[in-house]
Structure formats: C-alpha cells, structure tokens
Image (cartoon, helix red, strand yellow):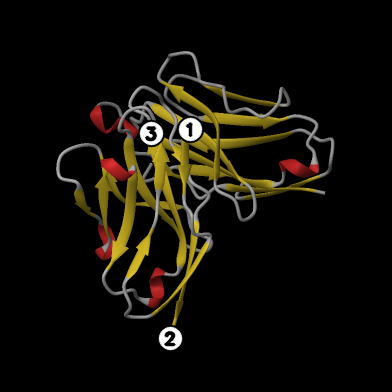
Amino acid sequence: AQSVTQPDIHITVSEGASLELRCNYSYGATPYLFWYVQSPGQGLQLLLKYFSGDTLVQGIKGFEAEFKRSQSSFNLRKPSVHWSDAAEYFCAVKPNSGYALNFGKGTSLLVTP
Amino acid sequence: GAGVSQSPSNKVTEKGKDVELRCDPISGHTALYWYRQRLGQGLEFLIYFQGNSAPDKSGLPSDRFSAERTGESVSTLTIQRTQQEDSAVYLCASSPPGTSNTEAFFGQGTRLTVV
C-alpha cells in the first residue's frame, strides 16, 4: 500500500544545533516529494519540493532535503536551527499517476535555548 | 485573490446540524483539494477537483460529506448531521495548471467544533 512515514513524532533540538527530520515513502515509482511547515495558528507553507534531477534540493528558510531512491527517503535538514523554526513539519508525496498529495503524520519540532 | 481564502475561520455547531465550509482558491488555479486535520494528526485527503473533470471523492469518510465546485471557482464542503468526530480543522488547497500542478497552496483552514 502507498504510504508516507515520518518516524519521529516529536524532536527537540537546541538553538544553533543541526536538524534532520526523516521521511520515508512506499510507492511503486518515484513520486513527487514535498516538505511543508505549519507554524502555530498558521497555514501550511511549502519549504521545498523534488520532482526530478538533482537529488539535493534547497528550500526556503535555509532548509534542504535529499532524495535517496535506494532508501525511499526524503529527509529534511538544516545546519543551524533558529527558535523560529519551532513548528510542525509535514512530508508529502504525490504519486506521478495520481492526484492527491498524501501527507505523513508530521513531526513536531521544539527548539530549546 | 492573493491566497487561498477559507470561511468561516471558526465554526461551532451542535451535533446533528449541517455545516457548510467555503473555499476561494487562488485565481487561475485549476486544481482544488480538501483535507481534514484532526488534533495532533496529519492531513487526511478528502476530495480533489481538477477543472471540469469528475472529482476524486475517494477520501470522503462517509456519505454525510459532500463537496461541490463550479468550474474553477469557489468550492463548498458540506457535512450533514455533524458528529463529534467531525471536529477538526478543514484545509483547502489549490494548484495552478501545467507541470507545477502538483504544488499545493493552502488556506488558513476552518476549525470546526461539534458540541
């Protein structure tokens, strides 16, 4: 069955530390891949996306993600986290033969001083 | 408009009542999605509209849920005989035509509380 998995429900990092949020998918063919961020009281904002080509994609707010076909993963990274990065992060996948964006359950990021 | 607009932003209704949620997509966007987000959960796909094609209703959880969209304009999501488990944030998103069709832009959502 097609699925999107974000293994970490909560992650806590210190401000200035590096961050990696995991996302794994299970689809027959390489789908389109996205990361969205949802800040408290805000709508979802697209951080970055992967359709094809270079497997390391750069996004907004200093985020990047790497697509690894062999691991069916699309992990989100940031070298130095800021307190304003505290939010809920969602990995989303769209099969290239379907319509709907399928979302993972999200990872809640807490940033400590 | 500048972004996807949803109304109302908050709705409290009594169990058993019908509710109607509205979504105004970004002008020119041919695709429109509805999602449900329960507290602490991910986004659950409900329905997808693409232009004048038949909508993909595969995510609607029961026949109490329905949605309409006229052309490429406003969409309404209707929940009949609301139940407490319908309490959630209902998110609408739209996408432009063409190869970038897969990128969705989200509204702020409607928070529905069934009491």
A34 to the left or right of A90: left
Q: Mark 1, residues whose alpha carbon is within 10 Å: few (<14), some, or many (≥20)?
A: many
Q: Observer-nearest residue: A113 or B6? A: A113
Amino acid bearing label 1: Tyr
Chain letter of the residue carrying label 1: B
Which element type, helix, strand or loop, lies under badge 1? strand
Which element type, helix, strand or loop, lies under badge 3? strand
Which dot marks residue B33?
Answer: 1
Q: Mark 3, residues whose alpha carbon is within 10 Å: few (<14), some, or many (≥20)?
A: many
Query: Which residue sits at x=32%, y=80%?
Result: A16
Which dot marks residue A113?
Answer: 2
Q: Observer-nearest residue: A14 or A88? A: A14
Which dot marks residue B51?
Answer: none
For this orientation, the residue located farthest to the front is A70
Chain letter of the residue carrying label 2: A
| 3 or 1: mark nearer the eye | 3
Query: Which residue sits at x=25%, y=65%?
Result: A62
Q: Quadrant of the N terminus of chain B?
A: top left
A47 to the left or right of A57: right
The mark nearer the N terminus, 2 or 3, is 3
Image coords of residue A60 (percent x, y):
26, 58
Query: Which residue sits at x=48%, y=13%?
Result: B54
Which dot marks residue A94?
Answer: 3
Q: Could you tell me if the residues under marks 1 and 2 are in contact, i.e. CB atoms within 8 Å?
A: no
Amino acid bearing label 2: Pro
A108 to the left or right of A47: right
- Distance between the Cα atoms at labels 2 and 3? 36 Å
Chain letter of the residue carrying label 3: A
Image coords of residue A110 (percent x, y):
48, 72
Image coords of residue A53 (percent x, y):
15, 39
- Distance between the Cα atoms at labels 1 and 2? 38 Å
Q: Mark 2, residues whose alpha carbon is within 10 Å: few (<14), some, or many (≥20)?
A: few
